[in-house]
Image: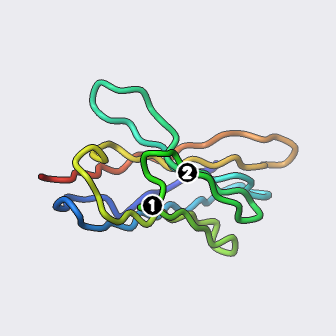
């Protein structure tokens, strides 16, 4: 009933930028926390950034100062602006959201989008 659709991934050179977006749609009562995770080959999925419904953001130490998370509550959309990209940022990036549907709170995931940073 609820889906998150991601876009914006691609191939960039070291030092370049990308902007990811993720829009939630479906049987949504309210969207609570939203965030971005990434999973590199052979690695565990890790939290990159999180933003609360009120707009408070937190970041993994590895991306602080380079990535910016934001959201548009009217569009149920979360963004990740990625600047000064490094090869170690290469991963599949997944958006996630905690969404209330009726009386249930569930955690949803986007389909993933590949980000590749060449050296």
Q: Secondary structure at mark 1?
A: strand
The reply to whether dot 2 and dot 1 touch (C-beta < 8 Å) is yes
Q: Report the residue that reaches farthest toward the right.
A: 103
Instruction: Tell which circle, 2 or 1, labels the residue nearer the N-terminal end.
Output: 2
Point 42% across, 42% down: residue: 38
The spot of residue 20 in percent (x, y) is: 41, 63
Report the side of 83 relative to 12 (left or right). right
Point 71% across, 65% down: residue: 55
Report the side of 33 relative to 63 (left or right). right
The spot of residue 45 in percent (x, y) is: 44, 32
Q: Report the residue that reaches farthest toward the left.
A: 119
The spot of residue 41 in percent (x, y) is: 27, 30
Q: Secondary structure at mark 2?
A: strand
Say which residue label 2 marks: 59
Report the side of 112 relative to 4 (left or right). left
Category of crowding for the residue at label 2, using alpha-carbon neighbours closer than 10 angstroms: few (below 14), some (14–19), many (at least 20) = some
Report the side of 84 relative to 96 (left or right). left
| Tag of residue 6 | none
**Quick one: 81 or 106, which is closer to the camera?**
81
Q: Is 30 above or below relative to 98?
A: below
Q: Label 2, label 1: how many angstroms apart (C-alpha)?
A: 8 Å
**Quick one: 60 or 114, which is closer to the camera?**
60
**Quick one: 21 or 119, which is closer to the camera?**
119
Q: Is 103 above or below relative to 70?
A: above
Say which residue label 1 marks: 67
Point 19% across, 59% down: residue: 14
């Amino acid at each position: 009933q609820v889906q998150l659709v991601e876009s914006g991934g691609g191939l960039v050179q070291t030092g370049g930028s990308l902007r990811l977006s993720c829009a939630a749609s479906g049987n949504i009562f309210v969207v609570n926390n939203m965030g971005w995770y990434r999973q590199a080959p052979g690695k565990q999925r890790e939290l990159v950034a999180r933003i609360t419904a009120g707009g408070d953001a937190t970041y993994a130490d590895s991306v602080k100062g380079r990535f910016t998370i934001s959201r548009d509550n009217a569009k149920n959309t979360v963004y990740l602006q990625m600047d000064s990209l490094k090869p170690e940022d290469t991963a599949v990036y997944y958006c996630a959201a905690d969404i209330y549907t009726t009386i249930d709170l569930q955690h949803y995931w986007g389909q993933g989008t590949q980000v590749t940073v060449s050296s």
